[in-house]
Image (spheres, grey):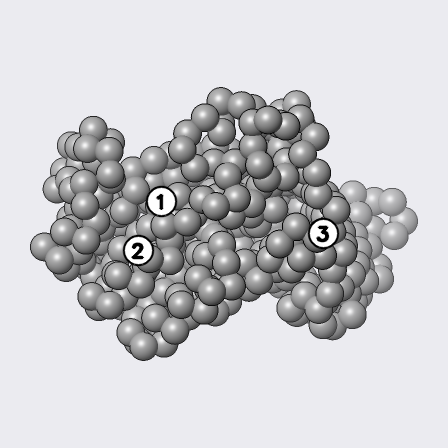
Amino acid sequence: MRAAVIGCGNISRVHLSALDAMEDVTLVAVADCVAARAEKAAQKYGCRAYTDYITMLDEERPDTVHICTPHHLHVDMACEALRRGCNVLCEKPCAISADGLARLRQAQKESGKQCGVCFQNRYNAGVQLAGKLLAASAYGSLQAAAAHVLWCRGADYYSDEWHGKKSTEGGGVLVNQSIHTVDLLRYLIGADMQSCTAHISNDHLQGVIDVEDTALVRMVYANGITAQMDATVAFSCNANVQMDLFCEKGTLHLSGAELYAFSADGQVEKLTGKVQNATVGKDYWGGGHPALFRDFYTCLREGKPFSIDFFEGGKATEDFLRFYAAAGTN
């Protein structure tokens, strides 16, 4: 199976490394508007380099395209690839507007091709185990959930041409850093969000970005479960994401990829074994990309639908758009 990558920035390193390790996938080309970035990646992984992704698609005709570009470019690039009969695996968020998401979903339907969104943390060992325990009601029924995203981003992070701008990033901490946690809450709670309240602010990057660096949201899901999330890039370090799933007979606590159980009598048990960090990126990104890629390509080979397509993966976009509406900033 032949693959190509569009965008050779930070997150592409995770995709390129994982693809290089897959025996049944051949990386044939990369594209980036900065020639030096494309050439560097092509030289490292032994493929061809392009500065125009359309030319790459037309000349290479890859089976699958990985989209690792700034957020505002995802929709157009995915639609162009789908029109050419390519399968598409897109970094989050797949879209930053309702219109863009509608275009993506229509393009998926019309193409009949496989599409995926990279919510790799669903594949973390702790998340997988938590899902099984919740499904089995091992600690009784789920009552509520809470999550905390405490990361650090300074002015240097926003010094490029697209981060920190509403028009190109789509928002701040809610769109970029905490979107994985928003996805995990809905995934583990097992229902779509029904309503929300949200408060957002720019606490330490005023004059640097035009989006929020801090947010507090409360969500009510269709099954009656409530959840609360606080998220910031104004913290002093990059901490593991924390999530608590409050059940009748105890609490499941996720810290990064690890899962703990707090019983009603105060006992604490670590439920995951030693978790191997498989990512070549930052530790707190999570190490689930290789597992997600393997699942995606297995679905391609076996003709099974990939579970996080633009309809499922796009729900995180719907959620953050509702957060902004609730905060009065849409």
Tell me the element at label 2: helix
Instruction: List the single residue furthest toward the right.
Output: 265
Amino acid of disc 2 = Met
Q: What residue do we see at 48% from left, 46% from top?
A: 167
In terms of depth relative to the viewer, which is nearer, 252 or 4? 4
Direction from residue 236 to residue 61 in the image, left or right: left
How far separated are the C-alphas under marks 2 and 3?
A: 30 Å
The disc labelled 1 sits on which kind of residue?
Thr
Q: Is 270 displayed left or right of 1 in the figure? A: right
Whether pointer 2 and pointer 1 mark residues with C-beta atoms closer than 8 Å, the reply is: yes
Q: Specify the label residue 327 is tagged with.
A: 3
What number is the disc on residue 48?
none
Query: Which residue sits at x=29%, y=74%?
Result: 111
Q: Which residue is mark 2?
A: 77
Residue 298 in the figure: left or right of residue 27 = right
Q: Closer to the camera: disc 2 or disc 3?
A: 3
Please state which of residues 137 and 4 is positioned toward the viewer in this rendering: 4
Is mark 2 in CB contact (under 8 Å) with mark 3? no
Q: Which mark is residue 69?
A: 1
Question: What is the quadrant of residue 49 in the picture?
Answer: top left
Q: Quadrant of the N terminus?
A: bottom left
